[in-house]
Image: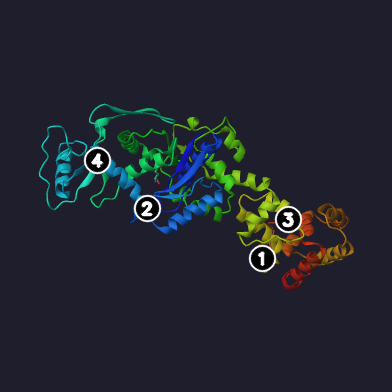
Amino acid sequence: MAITRFAPSPTGYLHIGGLRTALYSYLWAKKTNGEFKLRIEDTDNARNNEDAVKAILEAFEWVGMPSDCEIEYQSKRTDIYKKYIAQLLEEGKAYKCYMSRDELDALRAKQEAAKENPRYDGTWRPEDGKVLPEIPADVDPVIRIKAPTSGTILFEDGVKGSMKFDANQVDDFVIARANGMPIYNFVVAIDDHLMGMTDVLRGDDHLSNTPKQIVIYNALGFDVPKFYHMPMINNPSGKKLSKRDGAMDVMQYKADGYLPEALLNFLVRLGWSNGDQEIFSMDEMLELFDPNNINKSASAYNAEKLLWLNAHYIKNVSNERLANELEFFECHLEGHDKKEMILDLCKERANTLVELKDAITNILDVPTSYDAKGSKKFVKEGTIEMLNSYVSLLKANKEMHTPVDIEGFTKPFITDNGLKFPQVFQPIRIALTGGTNAPSVYDIIAVLGIEETVTRINNAIAVSFGKKEV
Ligand code: GLU
C-alpha cells in the first residue's frame, strides 16, 4: 500500500510536467489501495499567490484526481516545524550559527577563488573539546543541521537505481533562518514523514535535495521513503519544454478543447510504457502502471499525439458527456431534438472540443454571410432554378427525416436532371452553412430538418445568390 503525494509550490499555474508527476503518484497510490495526498508548499510567501493555489486546485478538479486527505498547506504548519527544530537543537543534532552575511560572503569568495565547492566551514559546529567563537551581539543565528562529515548517503531510487552521495557533499545546511522560519528541505522531510509517505515520486530536478532530506530523516529517526526521480519532459528537439511547446497551464488544455482523459493518457505515456499500447483508460492505467518501469531517459512532448488521442476520446466518449463538455464552450445542445445526430456527425472529424463546437455551430447557426469564392465557383447559370426545383422536392418530402431518406429522393433528382453532384451539393452547402466546408448534405439536411433547409435555401437565394451576376 503506497502513500504518495503531490506537493506543488504555488508560484504559478500547474503545468503538464507537474500533472504527470501527480498522475504517476496518484496511479501508484490507487493501484496499491493506498492514498494520494495533496500538499501546497507555500512557505515562500514572496512568491506564492492565492490565485496560483486556486488554479492548481481547479486543475486537479478538472482531471479528477482528488486528494485523499484534507489538503495540507505548509504555511499553516510552522509550529510543527519549529517543534522539530527545537527537538534537534535540544538533542545536539542541530546548532546555532552566528556567522554574519559578510563572513559567509568572504568564505564563499575564498572557496570560489580556490576552485572549491562553496560549503559551510563548520565554524559554529559544536564538537567535543572544541571552543566555539564568542557569540556576537548583533547577529541573529540561523539553525544548521549537524550533517555527517564522512561516509556515504545511499538510497535506491525506483527510476535511477542505486544512488550514492559522499556525505561530505552535504554540508551543515541551514534548516531555519535567522527569523526562525524553517527552510524548504527541512519542511519537505517533516511533512513527508508526518503525512505517512511511503513513496515519493518527483522530477529529477529534485534529486540534489534528496541527500539533504535523508540527513533530516536520519537525524530525526524517521523511515526514509522510497524515491522515484523522474526525468524531465523535453520538447521534440530534446530541449527544455517551453510554453510554446506545450508547457502551459493545464487549464489551457481545457480551454483549447482537450478532454482530461486524453491529457492523462498522453501524460502516462510520456515517461512510461506498456509494450506499444497507446490508449489507456484510467482502469488500464491503474492496472498496468508501475513506477519501477518509468523510463530512465527524458521523454519528448508530441503535440500531434495529444491531438490524436483527443480525437480518439472525442469519438469514444458518450454524446451526453460531449454535450456537457460543450457547455463550457457556450455550445448548448441540451434539449435539441437532433442532439445525438449532430454529435454523431460532427465528432467524427473533430480533434478538439473547439473544433467540435465550430463544426456544430457551422451547421446550427443560420449563416450570416455566404462564402464569396465558393459562390463564384458554384453558383452558375441555372443554379437558382435548380435550387428552386430542389426546394419543391423538399417540400414534397416533408416527412423524410433520415440521411438515407434524403439521399433516396436527392440522388434521382441529380441524375434525372443530368446534373453533377458538386453542382448541386456545393450551392446547397453554401446556402445551409455559409461555406463549402461542411459534412454530407444529406446529414446536414437531416439535422436541420426539411423546413429549416427550405428556409435557408430560399434565404440564400434572396439575399445572395439571386443578387449575383451569373
Ligand atoms: N514543491 C516542489 C515543486 O513544486 C516539489 C517538492 C517535492 O516533490 O518534493 O517543485
Give the CA separation, mark 4 to mark 3. 72 Å
Q: Nearer the viewer, mark 3 or mark 2?
A: 2
- Residue marked by disc 2: 75
- The location of residue 86, given as percent across then percent down, is 27, 44
Side of 91 where 412 appears, left or right? right
Q: Answer whether labels 3 and 2 touch (C-beta < 8 Å).
A: no
Few, some or many C-alpha atoms within 10 Å of disc 1 (few <14, some 14-19, many ≥20)? some
State which mark lies toward you, 3 or 1: 3
| Dot 1 amino acid type | Ala
Q: Is residue 99 above or below residue 451?
A: above
Q: Are marks 3 and 1 in contact (CB under 8 Å)?
A: no
For marks 4 and 2, give the CA distance.
Answer: 24 Å
Alpha carbon distance from label 3 to label 2:
50 Å
Give the foreground label among 4 and 3: 4
Q: Quick one: label 4, few (<14), some, or many (20+) residues within 10 Å?
A: few
Q: Which residue is mark 4?
A: 90
Query: Counting other residues with Cα less than 10 Å from the Cα at mark 3, is it few (<14), some (14-19), or many (20 or more)?
Result: many
Q: Element under label 1?
A: helix
Name the residue type under label 3: Ile
What percent of the width, then of the height, locates residue 283? 61, 38
State the mark number for residue 342: 3
